[in-house]
Image (cartoon, rainbow, N blue to C red):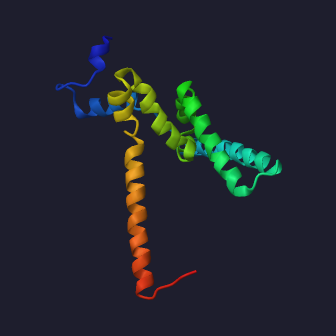
Amino acid sequence: MDENAKRPGPSMEPEEYAAYVKEVTPVHSTPFNMLKAFLTGGIICTIAQGVMRILTGNGMDKDTASLWTLLFLIGAAVLLTGLNLFPKIVTFGGAGALVPITGFANSVAAPAIEYKKEGQVFGIGCKIFTIAGPVILYGIFTSWVLGILYCLLQWIGVYWA
């Protein structure tokens, strides 16, 4: 049978179209995807905990070790993005790889790598925050709104520990 005969068109009946959609739509197992995300995020967090233990075990205080651990995770995510390995991890682990700070680092590094051929200003400079920009914007805005709300509640006498 000709491949073009399977493609949807104006002469296709609704039943035929439904069968076509069912044929070409990938099937996903939500519990299996959740397990993969859990394992991927768990592995990332276990690596971070290992870095923390190594740093604190060598005499570094907890706050400084936390900063170095974040830098390690960000650097690793950027390096893996540059080596084109992080997208493969995300394909496997989904949100498990995107939710930790590694996903944020990837969202900044990936557009920079993709658009570097367009130049420093119009490529990297304009596109680096394409994905991360809205996250930064709404994070700062939400913090500002919550700070104002907190001040107003304290001003009218509502306190909590």
The reply, left or right, for residue 8 in relation to residue 94 is left
Q: Which residue is more in the foreground, 131 or 68?
A: 68
Residue in the foreground of this view, choosing between 65 and 5: 65
Residue at the (38%, 67%) spot, across then down: 145
Q: Where is residue 61 shown, x and y percent of the image? A: 75, 56
- The outermost residue toward the top is 2
Q: Residue at x 71, y 46 (%)?
A: 46
Q: Is residue 151 left or right of residue 122?
A: right
- The location of residue 51, given as percent across then percent down, is 73, 44
Q: Residue at x 67, y 46 (%)?
A: 69
Q: Residue furthest left?
A: 10
Quarter of the rendering containing residue 138: bottom left
Taking the image as shown, residue 82 lies to the left or right of residue 11, namely right
Judge whether residue 29 can be spotted in this image: no
**Which picture quadrant has residue 122?**
top left
Residue 91 visible in the picture: yes
Vertical relation: 158 (above or below) 126:
below
Please report the residue visible at 39 percent of the width from the left and 40 percent of the height from the top: 129
Q: Quadrant of the C terminus?
A: bottom right
Q: Nearer the viewer, residue 94 or 25?
A: 94
Q: Is residue 16 depicted above or below 143 in this figure?
A: above
What is the x, y in percent for residue 30? 53, 44
The N terminus sits in image quarter: top left
